[in-house]
Amino acid sequence: MPKGAIKPNFNLLKQQLDELVAKLQSDDLDVDQALAYYKQAEQLITKLKAYLLQAENSVKVMKLK
């Protein structure tokens, strides 16, 4: 992440994923654009999973204290 960039939060990432899903469900979507949206969605899903894993680990640490 570039210096000074704001780290996206879970809700922002989820909103971006929801927007991509809506675009993918469009009837008049070009195949190449659909593939690009799909790849972007995969990247967002990976980030969301990492975010949730980090949150889960944080909760586990707090429980141990």
Image (cartoon, helix red, strand yellow):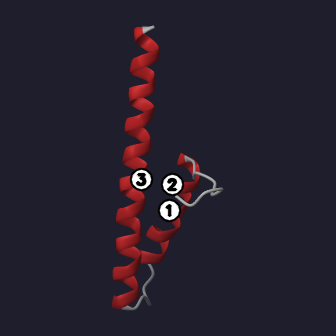
In the image, which disc is placed on residue 26?
Answer: none
* Residue that lies at the very extreme toward the front in this rendered image: 3
Q: Give the mark nearest the N terminus, 1 or 3.
A: 1
Give the quadrant of residue 27: bottom left
- Identify residue type, mark 2: Lys
- Identify residue type, mark 3: Lys
Q: 55 or 28, which lies in front?
A: 55
Badge 1 vs badge 2, beta-carbon distance below 8 Å: yes
The crowding category of the residue bearing disc 1, from other C-alpha atoms within 10 Å (few below 14, some 14 to 19, many at least 20), is: few
Q: Position of residue 23 (x, y in %)?
A: 48, 76
Q: Give the mark nearest the N terminus, 3 or 2.
A: 2
| Mark toward the viewer: 1 or 3 | 3
Q: Position of residue 53 (x, y in %)?
A: 37, 37
Location of mark 2 (residue): 14
| Mark toward the viewer: 3 or 2 | 3
Looking at the image, residue 65 sits to the left or right of residue 53; the answer is right
Q: CA distance from mark 1 to mark 2?
A: 6 Å
The crowding category of the residue bearing disc 3, from other C-alpha atoms within 10 Å (few below 14, some 14 to 19, many at least 20), is: some
Q: 25 or 37, which lies in front?
A: 37
Location of mark 3 (residue): 47
Q: Identify the secondary structure beneath mark 2.
A: helix
* Residue that lies at the very extreme toward the top in this rendered image: 65
Q: Position of residue 20 (x, y in %)?
A: 47, 70
Q: Is residue 58 above or below residue 37?
A: above
Q: CA distance from mark 3 to mark 2?
A: 10 Å
- Identify residue type, mark 1: Asp
Q: Is residue 25 visible?
A: no
Q: Identify the secondary structure beneath mark 1.
A: helix
Location of mark 1 (residue): 18
Image quarter of the C terminus: top left
Q: Is residue 14 above or below residue 61?
A: below
Q: CA distance from mark 1 to mark 3?
A: 14 Å
